Amino acid sequence: GGAEFTQAASHTIRGAGQINSQIINNGTIRAEPFNGTTLLVNAFQTNNNVMQAASGATLEFQSNTSDTLQGASGVISAADGGTVILENTSITGGRLETTETGKIDVTQSSSLTNVTNAGNLNIQAFRTLNVSGSTFTNDGVITVNSDGGSVFTNLKFNEDTLLDGTGEVFL
């Protein structure tokens, strides 16, 4: 429940804390290490622009209440030294991106549908990344079992899907 708000294209939300309201993001949401290091997204959102973890910060999408629908220009990114965490969430559409040492970690099983990966995407031990959609474009690096903890770590395709792009999958 609760109200939904829309963030305009020229507006920025930044810092650490929680977003607990449904949001339509047309601007920038940036986790920054200010009064903490984590910006927790804990509600459904539509992302039409940028959601980013800056250097030294974590942008965390937590539980199935933080599912994300991304428009064609929607990007979830981790800057150099930043981390995006996917924890039991789903993302539909748009792109995942990282720069240099930035990373996207699947810490609880999560789902991607019609998403392009252009970054360092890590699936941690005992977790599953479910992939759906007719095409999954991977222009980055997906590392399965990135922390070396278990053979029970999966990159799972839930339907007939073309794995496309210039990237790599490390098992």
Image (cartoon, rainbow, N blue to C red):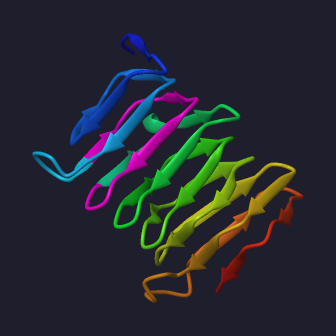
Residue at the left extreme? 35
Residue at horizontal 78 percent and vertical 58 percent from the top: 136
Coordinates of residue 105 in the picture (x, y in percent): 45, 65
131 w.r.t. 120: above or below? above
Coordinates of residue 117 in the picture (x, y in percent): 66, 59
52 w.r.t. 155: above or below? above
* Most foreground residue, 133 or 156: 133
Q: Quadrant of the C terminus?
A: bottom right
Coordinates of residue 132 in the picture (x, y in percent): 76, 52
Per the rendered image, the range of residues in magenta is 39-57
* Most foreground residue, 98 or 169: 98
- Classify residue 150 as left or right of residue 15: right
Residue at horizontal 87 percent and vertical 50 percent from the top: 134
* Most foreground residue, 165 or 126: 165
Please tell me in which quadrant of the rendered image residue 97 appears: bottom right
- Classify residue 57 as left or right of residue 133: left
146 w.r.t. 95: above or below? below
Residue at the front extreme? 10
